[in-house]
Image (tube, rainbow, N blue to C red):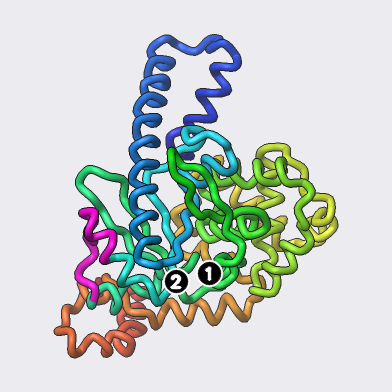
Amino acid sequence: MASDHSVRPQLVRSLSALGWDRVPPALRNDLENFMRVHGAFCLAAAEQLGRVTAALAARGLPVAVFKGAALAAALHRDLTAREYNDIDLIVRPSDVDTAEDVLEGFGYRSTQGDRRFRKAFLAHQRQYALVHADQATVDLHWAFTARHVPFPLSVDEIWSSVEQVAIGPRRVATIGGAALALLLAGHGTKEGWRSLGWVCDFALLVDRQRDLDWLGVHRRARAQDCGDSVLLACVMAERLLGVAVPEALGPLAKASSRVDALASVLIADLREPQGQDRRQNLADLDLCDSRWRRAVASVAIGLAPTVSDHNAMPLPPVLWPLYRVTRPFRLGLKALGIGR
């Protein structure tokens, strides 16, 4: 379960503090071996992260690192204190192609087709995965969520307030303070809070930054039609980890029947994961406070061409715009059990 929820470092730390009482020797050995491998990975990822961000900066590209090593160092204050397996970078939308050129110089390649294909079928996700034979995968973002849903934090907001964090011998730009609260709340909600590790991250932020302007954080999220995501994150942290909802947000959290219902469903899914599969593909709709916005987002999903559309009916590039017309019909037939 700790592996599934990416909390093995926290489990090891807790068991160690208890003197490994009643832990079978073989299991202790497995967990300690994991920490050795995890530590080596973290050091290698930190080195690569420093080299990549320095190369991007040399090309004049603003870049921020988030989640992964940056969150481990800035929030947990220990590179090995949280479990992660990739490097998340965010750049301005206009810099994506140049950033990809830089990453290709380090040996990173996309496994999702060439650039023309990705722009046609994957650009709505606003992130690309780039892989390397010997290094951690890089997720290159130009927004924090797909085009069809809002998010509590916009990319335009982060550049004037990035913070520097030490990653190995270098300092890199990352997201902190109120912006980090918005990011963690939005990311967890977008992903249906299906990992306890994400709850741990947000709970630690709340515990360490009680003096944050939490009402201001909620106000900023609400302006993006995502206010409930902040309240939901606070309620998840309280119910699962006993970290009290910030005082300023307590009355708002208690008054929201939607947040209460969502938290109950998500916690039940964490305990009985069978229910997660039913929600996962549409979990990001929970970001939308209003029913109207959720309806609009659902329509946008239905109109955005995907790789599956191309696989089901391969067309030459000159005809790719037709997928916007054919996609609703394909989805309708699929719902009726006809076709792929």
- The answer, for residue 272, to whether it is visible in the render is no
Residue at the spot x=55%, y=66% of the render? Answer: 159
Could you tell me residue 313's position as x and y percent?
19, 79
Residue 15 left/right relative to 57: right
Kindly report the distance in space between the C-alpha atoms of the residues bearing marks 1 and 2.
Answer: 7 Å
Query: What residue span does the magenta drawing correspond to?
Result: 101-115
Quarter of the view holding residue 224: bottom right
Q: Is residue 170 above or below residue 328?
A: above
Quarter of the view holding residue 169: top left
For label 1, the SS is helix
Residue 265 left/right relative to 222: left
Residue at the spot x=38%, y=72% of the render? Answer: 95
Label whose residue precedes the other's in the sequence (1 or 2): 2
Residue at the spot x=52%, y=41% of the render? Answer: 72
Label at residue 273: none
- The answer, for residue 240, to whether it is visible in the render is yes
Could you tell me residue 229's position as x and y percent?
65, 61
In the image, is residue 27 part of the stretch drawn in magenta?
no
The residue singled out by tag 1 in the image is 155
What crowding class fits label 2: few (fewer than 14 Cα within 10 Å), some (14-19), or many (20 or more)? some
Q: Disc 1 residue type?
A: Val
Depth order, front residue of 272/98: 98
The residue singled out by tag 2 in the image is 92
Could you tell me residue 154's position as x and y percent?
56, 70
Q: Is residue 307 above or below residue 235?
A: below
Could you tell me residue 83's position as x and y percent?
45, 38
Q: Disc 2 residue type?
A: Arg
Q: Is residue 63 above or below residue 203?
A: below
Q: Quadrant of the C terminus?
A: bottom left
Badge 1 vs badge 2, beta-carbon distance below 8 Å: yes
